[in-house]
Image (spheres, rainbow, N blue to C red):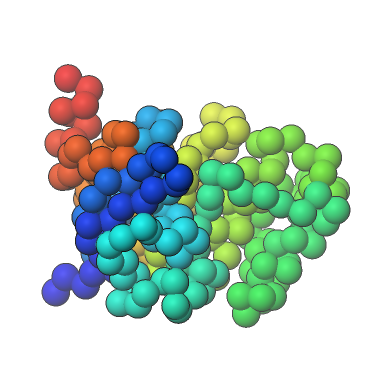
Amino acid sequence: MRRELVVLENICKRFWFTEALKNISLSIARGEHTLILGGNGSGKSTLIKIVGGLVKPSKGLVKVLGYNPFKYNMLGREVNILLDDYSLPPWLTGVEYLRYIARIRGVKRDSIVDIAAFFNITSYWKRVIGVYSAGMKKKIALIEAFIGDPEIIILDDPFTALDIGSRKRLIEFLERKAKDATIVVATHSLYGIENICRNKAILLDNGEKIMEGETIEVLNKIMF
């Protein structure tokens, strides 16, 4: 039986004189791993923030796990999210920050060690985040999105700043997480993520949904 985790109906979002999203409707069911595609300025990040309850739409209906995300905060519990414009505290070490996240989510702090080792950050995670490279920071932010046992994991441009090896590890890790959580990835670069998010792809352009369907069908129409 289909269980809808995300439902958006006629979503519009205006920032001053800019209409970032125009009448967007979509649904994502449990286990329906989904790609949100589009170039810069297409509306991907705004859509992600609305689903996460971080930005209110100008009009339209939003339901996540059956709730209004602007009244019931699910972030860090049922929904984990990586934003493209994430920020990390530069005065903390990586291990201090991740243990803090684990503590506020009610997760044993030792549970982050395996994830940290998988992403090869244990060699530097005792240094303060302020001295990290962009790729180091990105891996800390990714691990934050994986801490806990969420029903939905949302990643906005997860591949930026990662080297080839780290991209491969991310794909491998997401293959594992896809067994227990529904994965939603907003990106303009694939690197194999289409093999995980094969159920559905949604193409945005200039704030409008211009295509939706099985991922392979959408990609074929875009590329050929």
Residue 213: tell me if it is visible: yes
In the rendered view, would you say 202 is above or below 42? below
In the rendered view, would you say 107 is above or below 125? below
Q: Give the x, y percent position of residue 57.
A: 37, 58
Which of 146 and 55 lies nearest the eye of the viewer? 55
Seen in the image, is 131 located left or right of residue 48? Answer: right
Image point (44%, 78%), residue name: 71
Seen in the image, is 189 located left or right of residue 167? Answer: left
Determine the image quadrant of residue 205.
Answer: top left
Location of the C terminus (image quadrant)? top left
Location of the N terminus (image quadrant)? bottom left
Image point (62%, 79%), residue name: 106
Q: Give the x, y percent position of residue 33.
A: 30, 54
Image point (17%, 28%), residue name: 220
Q: Check the image and name the residue furthest to the top.
A: 224
Which of 85 and 3 lies nearest the eye of the viewer? 85
Q: Check the image and name the residue furthest to the front.
A: 17
Residue 52: tell me if it is visible: no
Q: Give the x, y percent position of residue 67.
A: 35, 77
Seen in the image, is 50 located left or right of residue 113? Answer: left
Determine the image quadrant of residue 219.
Answer: top left
Determine the image quadrant of residue 112.
Answer: bottom right
Tag count: 0
Which of 127 and 13 lies nearest the eye of the viewer? 13
Q: Give the x, y percent position of residue 199.
A: 22, 50
Image point (57%, 65%), residue name: 147
